[in-house]
Amino acid sequence: MNKILGVLIVALLFFIPILLKPPLPQAANERAGETELPDGKSSGMPSKDGPVCGAVLNVEGESKPVPIEEYVAGVLAGEMPVNFHEEALKAQAVASRTYALRLAGSSEGQIKTTTAHQVYKPEAKRRKLWDKSFAENERKVRRAVKETEGQVLVHEGELISAMFFSTSNGRTETAKNYGGTDIPYLQSVESSGEETVAPAFEDSVTLTLQAWNDALGSDWSADRFRTMKLRRNETGRVQTVAAEGFEMSGRDMRDKLGLRSTDFDVAYDPDKKVVHVFTKGFGHGVGMSQYGAEAYARDGWTAEKILSHYYSGTTIKKLSADDPACLKLP
């Protein structure tokens, strides 16, 4: 009996340290050398892959430089609905990180927080915007940022101009049609399924004839409308608008009239003297369509597949801390 009791005591002493050890983290949080805080933020400890790019950016309205990954979190909140699929959010994170680093490397000015560059919402604004849903939304956004940490898009070894926009008309626009410069990775590709996910795939606006004339700085009449011709390019967008004594690019027409896209049709009502303009899509159309990314993500596409589709011939690269593209501002 004493021998049995002795064996039990020895066994108990052996297992006590094991019982006192904390449980291993769940798979979703497993990263060597890193812990996740309750609000979804990283502790900042290095990952098992070694130091990644720790660039900081001069952002408009911020009193001190913003770390690149913190900036990307703010851009995700500003540029894409948080209820989007995680793969769409991850694709946006890579595109936005690439866009920011390329922009910062070519300009000494501050990065704007509007659509002039990228819409950016710092944490204080996110808390106010999401209110009671902040914790849940913040975790989702930061997870997309963390899972793409340091990843950028490159073409022939250089950061690309990762243009993106809201909604296509079924195809993306080429850089050449939009700005006159042919860029290999900004070609027209199919972007299907957006009509089922975008809230306003098609839209319309009605202008008085006076408002139309004021916007275009011209004097239109019913006779001129009858001579109007919309010359479309291969993506279905209006390249030029021509009428008797008038010619303008579709891009300029969109800007002057405040249209959602350059895929538009025009109808004039001479009795009411109003102009009806019907549009399809939203944005300049070049690069990645955000609602297209969402449609593809719902179909099971990964972020990598989405990015390779919209940015032809590019590859995803994870920037190391000593990469030249990883900016270190004083």
Image (cartoon, rainbow, N blue to C red):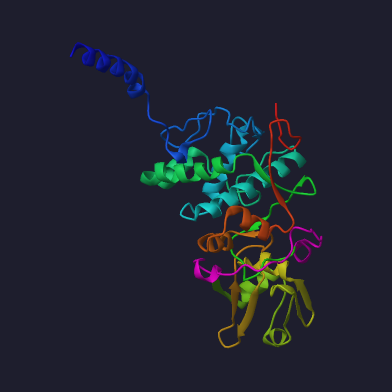
The image position of residue 35, as x and y in percent, is 48, 30
Would residue 107 be visible to someone looking at this image?
A: no
Task: In this rendered view, identify the residue nearer to me: 63 or 302.
Answer: 302
Magenta part, dominant SS: loop
The image position of residue 301, as x and y in percent, is 56, 59
Residue 110 quadrant: top right
Query: Which portion, as a residue range, is magenta?
Result: 175-201
Would residue 10 be visible to someone looking at this image?
A: yes
Q: Quick check: is 117 in the magenta stretch?
A: no
Q: Residue furthest left?
A: 1
Q: Is residue 73 left or right of residue 241?
A: left
The image position of residue 86, as x and y in percent, is 51, 52
In the depicted structure, whether residue 128 falls above or below residue 280: above
In the depicted structure, whether residue 300 falls above or below residue 3: below
Q: Is residue 20 left or right of residue 146?
A: left
The image position of residue 121, as x and y in percent, is 53, 43
Q: Is residue 266 left or right of residue 147?
A: right
Q: Quick check: is 187 in the magenta stretch?
A: yes
